Amino acid sequence: MRNLITDRKKDAKSVKIKKNKDNVKFKVGYSLYLYTYLFITDKEKVQKLKQSLPPGLAVNELK
């Protein structure tokens, strides 16, 4: 979780939040790569992490 919060590179463009039955994945899209950072099973942590995302990123929630 630390990597996603502290890794605020300038070339980050979007965050995709993919929800499954068991977990939630946060995928961050940079100019060249797409990184999958987290597999979270706790719903409270997911909400806290959504609120801590930088305001300039486009957030897409996939189900």
Image (cartoon, helix red, strand yellow):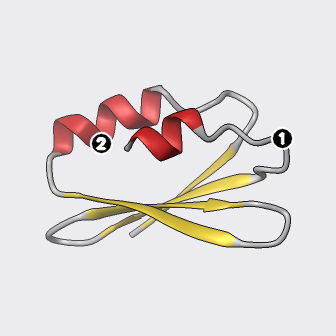
Q: Quadrant of residue 34?
A: bottom right
Q: State the image coordinates of residue 38 (x, y, percent, origin top left).
A: 37, 58
Residue assigned mark 2: 46
Q: Secondary structure at mark 1?
A: loop
Left or right of 6 on screen, residue 26: left
Q: Quadrant of residue 33?
A: bottom right
The answer to whether mark 2 and mark 1 are in CB contact below 8 A is: no
Q: State the image coordinates of residue 15 (x, y, percent, origin top left).
A: 60, 54
Q: Amino acid at mark 2?
A: Val
Q: Secondary structure at mark 2?
A: helix
| Near-viewer residue (36 or 50) | 36
The answer for how far apart the CA atoms under marks 2 and 1 are is 23 Å
Q: State the image coordinates of residue 7 (x, y, percent, origin top left).
A: 61, 41
| Near-viewer residue (55 or 62) | 55
Q: Indicate the quadrant containing the N terminus: top left, top right, bottom left or bottom right.
A: top left
Left or right of 55 on screen, residue 48: left
Q: Amino acid at mark 1?
A: Lys
Q: Residue at x 56, y 34 (%)?
A: 6
Q: Residue at x 17, y 71 (%)?
A: 21
Residue assigned mark 1: 10
In this rendering, is residue 42 above or below 8?
below
In this rendering, is residue 20 above or below 52?
below
In this rendering, is residue 46 above or below 41?
above
Q: Residue at x 68, y 27 (%)?
A: 55
Is disc 2 surrounded by few (<14), some (14 to 19) or many (20+) residues within 10 Å? Answer: some
Left or right of 23 on screen, residue 11: right
Q: State the image coordinates of residue 50 (x, y, percent, origin top left).
A: 44, 36
Q: Indicate the quadrant containing the C terminus: top left, top right, bottom left or bottom right.
A: bottom left
Which marked residue is nearer to the observer: mark 2 or mark 1? 1
Is disc 1 surrounded by few (<14), some (14 to 19) or many (20+) residues within 10 Å? Answer: few
- How many numbered marks appear? 2
